[in-house]
């Protein structure tokens, strides 16, 4: 979002630099920003890992991974320039001495630049280490300049409202709120950001964007992958915490928020909190009416036979963890009264496809009813991934002598404009380097999002679902998720 160049030298400290996220997302993002000339004029990446290693070894490991995960090609010239900025340091997350060494390294870098540079700490580690790291950062005063030092925290941010509040309180002992960048990588996706441009950069859609003209909204994030190597994490998490509390609720906020007065981060974040506050809270006895959970059994995805969730390595044979969730939300505010927002997400589904469907209300009167022509509903479909486009579906006359109608589409295709769009992490890391918080979650946003989930989360935890597994790998989820929308005369698109 921000367009300024970064003049301040910056040291980026990555805790957990040998982990999966660093190799797949963080280093490729920094490398691509470097090629695009978007990194600060002077920068260093301090890669922290538990094991002993040399700079050279670590750099080779990063290079190998860039070959697989970088958006842009790795050329000898770019790599030679980039690699010189990476330094590896052995670091023990829970040892005070490691932080004292880190302090010294940071001071040494500042001496090279002749100025106290910015510091960006990236916590790419298991959530249970956040507390110990922020405690040591405080004790050693390595992030003592609230104007220059920032911390990026990965999701999951807590596992319920109480733990999120606790974590926020803990972080606030070391950092001011404006130093804390809570990442939700969906907010960095090109198509998700485009919702803002589409809604508030045009005059023709906004007058229709309310309960008077919109019948329902659907948000689907379907994945083909299963739990991969993350069984232990996923067993504790499930689809509700892993996807809905963050990614899907954030998309819902972008679709439904009131127009912000400006693009100020506090303004946009305030509008999103308003949405979260307006989401109707439900009582425990209504959970089955508003929410459906699922767990995949064996099946076939893309012609490949797949095991069921309970047969995956590291998963309990009687696991009660949901790999699919669908929820009907209502927003109790002026704009969205009685408009259902259906959201669903699942693993091992038929295809990888994330999209939003805005379905408009039917015409009050069908002028073409005498010739018994059925009119399809007008829809706006925003494809988030892998397609990245916006489609407006409407009725038009079939060319010919008779007045026959057919549904047609008008398409804006992101790829046709630019087929090389930045990855979400590139956008988000650049914003963090620039000090713009707009695309990150504020403490009250996270807490409110957990509050929205509370009743469903607690009810599902307490009660075992005896129908599990209730959908086949390679399908669109359990039958009950169809019933959830059909009850209101709707259908998943
Ligand atoms: C992560 C979840 O936040 O998002 C994963 O933890 C999920 O379980 C992933 O697979 C999906 O991200 P994307 O960008 O591939 O849609």
Image (tube, rainbow, N blue to C red):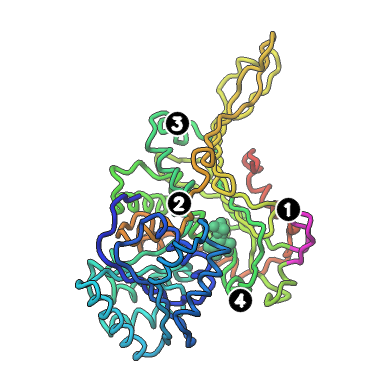
Instruction: For mark 4, give the secondary structure.
Output: helix
Q: Nearer the viewer, mark 3 or mark 1?
A: 1
> Mark 3 vs mark 4: which is more N-terminal?
3
Residue 280 seen by the camera:
no
**In this figure, which residue is indicated by the disc labeled 4?**
232
Q: Residue at x 58, y 45 (%)?
A: 387
> Where does label 3 land, which residue?
208
Dot 3 falls on a residue whose secondary structure is helix
Look at the image and give the residue range highlighted in magenta. 297-308
Say if residue 229 shows up in the picture.
yes
Q: Is residue 241 above or below residue 197?
A: below
Discs 1, 4 touching: Cβ within 8 Å: no
For residue 336, side relative to residue 366 (left or right): left
Observer-side mark, 2 or 1, equals 1
The structure residue drawn at horizontal position 58% and vertical position 73%, both measured from the top left corner, is 233
Tell me the residue that label 1 is attached to: 475
Tell whether circle 1 marks a residue whose Cβ is less than 8 angstroms from ligand 1: no
- Label 2 belongs to which residue? 279
Crowdedness near tag 1: few (<14), some (14–19) or many (≥20) residues, C-alpha within 10 Å = some
Between the residue at mark 2 and the residue at mark 3, the CA separation in whole angstroms equals: 21 Å
Asked if the residues shown at circle 2 and circle 1 are in contact, with their CB atoms under 8 angstroms apart, the answer is no
């Amino acid at each position: 979002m921000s367009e300024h160049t970064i003049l301040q030298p910056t040291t980026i400290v990555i805790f957990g630099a040998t982990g999966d996220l660093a190799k797949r997302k963080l280093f490729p993002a920094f490398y691509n920003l470097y090629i695009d000339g978007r990194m600060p004029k002077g920068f260093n990446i301090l890669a922290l890992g538990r094991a002993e290693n040399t700079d050279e070894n670590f750099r080779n490991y990063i290079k190998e991974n860039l070959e697989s995960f970088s958006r842009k090609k790795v050329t000898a010239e770019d790599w030679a320039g980039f690699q010189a900025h990476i330094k590896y340091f052995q670091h023990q997350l829970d040892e005070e001495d490691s932080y004292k060494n880190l302090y010294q390294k940071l001071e040494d870098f500042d001496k090279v630049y002749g100025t106290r540079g910015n510091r960006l700490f990236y916590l790419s580690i298991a959530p249970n280490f956040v507390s110990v790291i922020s405690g040591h950062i405080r004790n050693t005063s390595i992030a003592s300049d609230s104007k220059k030092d920032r911390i990026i925290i990965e999701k999951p941010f807590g596992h319920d409202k109480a733990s999120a509040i606790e974590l926020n309180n803990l972080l606030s002992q070391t950092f001011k709120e404006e130093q804390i960048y809570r990442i939700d990588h969906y907010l960095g996706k090109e198509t998700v950001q485009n919702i803002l441009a589409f809604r508030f950069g045009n005059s023709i859609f906004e007058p229709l964007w309310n309960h008077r003209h919109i019948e329902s909204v659907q948000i689907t994030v379907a994945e083909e992958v299963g739990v991969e190597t993350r069984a232990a994490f996923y067993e504790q998490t499930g689809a509700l915490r892993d996807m809905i509390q963050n990614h899907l609720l954030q998309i819902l906020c972008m679709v439904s928020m009131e127009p912000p007065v400006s693009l100020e981060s506090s303004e946009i974040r305030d509008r999103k909190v308003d949405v979260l506050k307006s989401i109707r809270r439900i009582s425990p006895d209504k959970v089955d009416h508003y929410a459906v959970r699922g767990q995949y059994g064996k099946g076939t995805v893309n012609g490949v036979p797949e095991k069921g969730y309970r047969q995956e390595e590291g998963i309990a044979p009687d696991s009660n963890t949901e790999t699919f969730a669908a929820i009907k939300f209502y927003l109790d505010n002026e704009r969205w009264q009685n408009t259902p927002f259906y959201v669903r997400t699942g693993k091992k589904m038929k295809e990888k496809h994330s999209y939003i469907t805005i379905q408009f209300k039917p015409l009050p009167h069908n002028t073409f009813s005498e010739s018994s022509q059925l009119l399809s509903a007008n829809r706006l479909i925003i494809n988030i991934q892998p397609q990245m486009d916006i489609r407006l579906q409407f009725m038009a006359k079939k060319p010919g002598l008779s007045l026959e109608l057919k549904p047609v589409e008008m398409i804006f295709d992101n790829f046709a404009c630019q087929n090389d769009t930045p990855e979400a992490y590139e956008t988000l890391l650049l914003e963090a380097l620039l000090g713009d918080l707009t695309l990150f979650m504020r403490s009250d946003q996270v807490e409110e999002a957990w509050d929205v989930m509370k009743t469903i989360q607690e009810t599902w935890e307490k009660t075992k679902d005896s129908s599990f597994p209730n959908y086949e790998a390679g399908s669109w989820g359990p039958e009950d998720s169809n019933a959830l929308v059909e009850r209101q005369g709707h259908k998943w698109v």
